[in-house]
Amino acid sequence: MHSPLAVIHPEAKIGNNVTIDPFAVIEKDVVIGDNCRIFSHATILDGARIGSDCMIFPGAVIAGIPQDLKFAGEESTAEIGNHTTIRECVTVNRGTASKGKTVVGNNCLIMAYGHIAHDCIIDNNVIIGNASQLAGEVEVDNYAIISGGSLVHQFTRISKHVMIQGGSRVGKDIPPYTLIGREPIAYCGINIVGLHRRGFTKSQVFLIQDIYRTLYTRGLNNTEALNAIETEYEPSVERDLILNFIKTSKRGIVRGSIDD
């Protein structure tokens, strides 16, 4: 159902069973999949690509032009996956020439007043809490949770199954499976609750804990710790993900707790 009080460009591509409430705005170069709900006063601008079964709440703006002075009007997109909820007053900007797109994956929840800047890549099953702000080209991997009021510096990478405390200022890369908090932020253990919810076994959880003890509590520098992890632990999905993430980090990873 499309309200006659909504502003919908006739060339916008709207799927089946889409509800568009009064005073929503849908521009020309927009694609919206089936079974979506676009609430009143949501604004879907040129370059938006929205999957199926999504909800876009009042005041949200999808595909606004990047807040980047290098942006020169190039064509780009803001892509929202399937079964994703964008709550009130969230802004998701388009990409720039750097990546050409900003992506929010499937089954994500972006809570009220969140901001996702140009060229961010948000993978599947991610939760971003109220009023959290992601700067340009941030990457967030599957099942990460960024709690409310957090600020994430540009180019930062946040790996899988991470839980970040509300109000955090994130300027370093966050390795997989970790629980991050305090001020300034630090490694506070692994995300045991989240891992159990995702079906990790006790032996997998113990392995991850042990690897991070080697990284953070044995008094080794990063190079020594990586060598120890590589030689002392058999190859596994968990070990290899941790190793590869740290080895490819350009910003450096979050520090260990001062209590360690």
Image (tube, rainbow, N blue to C red):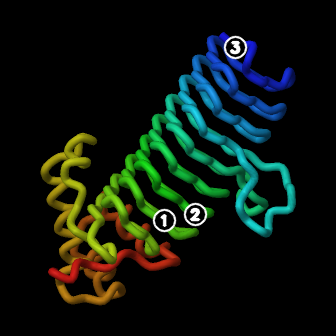
Whether the residues at callouts 3 and 1 have beta carbons within 8 Å, the answer is no
Residue under numbered circle 3 = 2
What type is the residue that disc 1 sits on?
A: Val
| Residue 144: image location, x then y, percent | 39, 51
Identify the secondary structure beneath mark 3: loop
Residue at point 37%, 70% (across, down): 243
Spatial distance from mark 2 to mark 3, Cα to Cα? 34 Å
Q: Residue at label 1?
A: 152
Badge 1: residue crowd in 10 Å (few <14, some 14–19, many ≥20): many
Task: State the separation of the CA atoms marked 3 and 1.
Answer: 37 Å
- The amino acid type found where label 2 is placed reads Ala
- Which label's residue is closer to the chain start, 3 or 1? 3
- The residue carrying mark 2 is 135
In the displayed structure image, the side of residue 141 where residue 5 appears, left or right: right
Number of the front mark, 3 or 1: 3
Dot 3 amino acid type: His
